[in-house]
Amino acid sequence: MILTDTEILKEIDLGSILIEPYDPKCLGTNSYDVHLGKHLATYEDEVLDAKKHNKIKHFEIPEEGFVLEPGTLYLGVTKEYTETHNHVPFLEGKSSTGRLGIDIHATAGKGDVGFCNTWTLEISVTHPVRVYVGMPIGQLIYFKVEGDVENLYHSKDNAKYTNRTIKPVESMMWKNKW
């Protein structure tokens, strides 16, 4: 079951959902709009290796915006820091960004109960498109959970994305044991 606007507000009041900064104008019927933060990153190597730490270079989006090019994976970040303690958050693109040919995630749209951080975006585009700091980039949707949660994300020993950041974070696949 997806939370409605009134349920999202109730959960914010209870402290089980935190959104910083919070703007009531961003609350939709059953979602909350999030915005592009000022940091982007690209991988340094042309060929990425799932078993090694692939380094990224960070840069800031200038005031006049930045043109994203097809064929490049950009890591972006939401302006909003979120905490979700009792629900499963999903980050989806907005139809307006999709209609510009912007995809905001390759596969990682679902967060875990207990995820507390900004959201790293896996941005790709079909056409060159200029993006700006603070533009609406996605929407968070919250799902109710059935049953008790034993392993909240931020408490798991093997959680790789728990350090609070305002910058996008590269893949930590290399930390997995396989």
Image (cartoon, grey):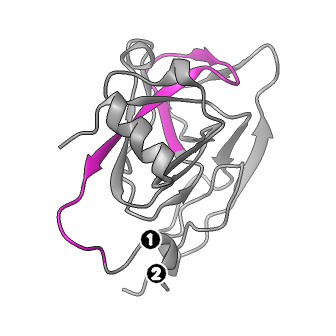
Q: Is 98 placed above or below 160 here?
A: above
* Residue 155 left/right relative to 37: left
- Residue at image position (56%, 66%) is 161
Residue 135 in picture, x, y percent from top left: 61, 20
The magenta region covers 121-149
Mark 1–mark 2 Cα distance, whole angstroms, equals: 5 Å
Expressed as whole percent of the image width and height from the top left, the position of residue 34 reads 53, 31
Question: Is residue 26 or residue 129 the one in the foreground?
Answer: 26
Q: Residue at x 50, y 36 (%)?
A: 123
Residue 153: which numbered mark, if any?
1
Query: Against 11, is 176 above or below?
Result: below
Secondary structure beneath dot 2 equals loop
> Which image quadrant is residue 5 in?
top left
Quadrant of the image containing the N terminus:
top left
On screen, 121 above or below 50?
Answer: above
Q: Local crowd at mark 2 within 10 Å, few (<14), some, or many (≥20)?
A: few
Figure quadrant of the C terminus:
bottom left
Dot 1: few (<14), some (14–19), or many (≥20) neighbours within 10 Å?
A: many
The reply to whether the magenta stretch includes residue 123 is yes
Residue type at mark 2?
Answer: Lys
Residue at image position (57%, 15%) is 129
Give coordinates of residue 113: x percent, y percent: 38, 62
Q: Residue 153: in sight, yes or no?
A: yes
Q: Nearer the viewer, residue 69 or 120?
A: 120
* Mark sitting on residue 156: 2
- Residues under numbered marks 1 and 2 in contact, where contact means CB atoms less than 8 Å apart: yes
Residue 60 belongs to magenta span:
no
Residue 145: percent from left, percent from top: 23, 59
Along the horizontal axis of the image, is 94 left or right of 172?
left
Q: Describe the element under mark 1 as helix, strand or loop.
A: helix
Closest to the observer: 69 or 92? Answer: 92
| Identity, as a three-letter code, of the amino acid under mark 1 | Tyr
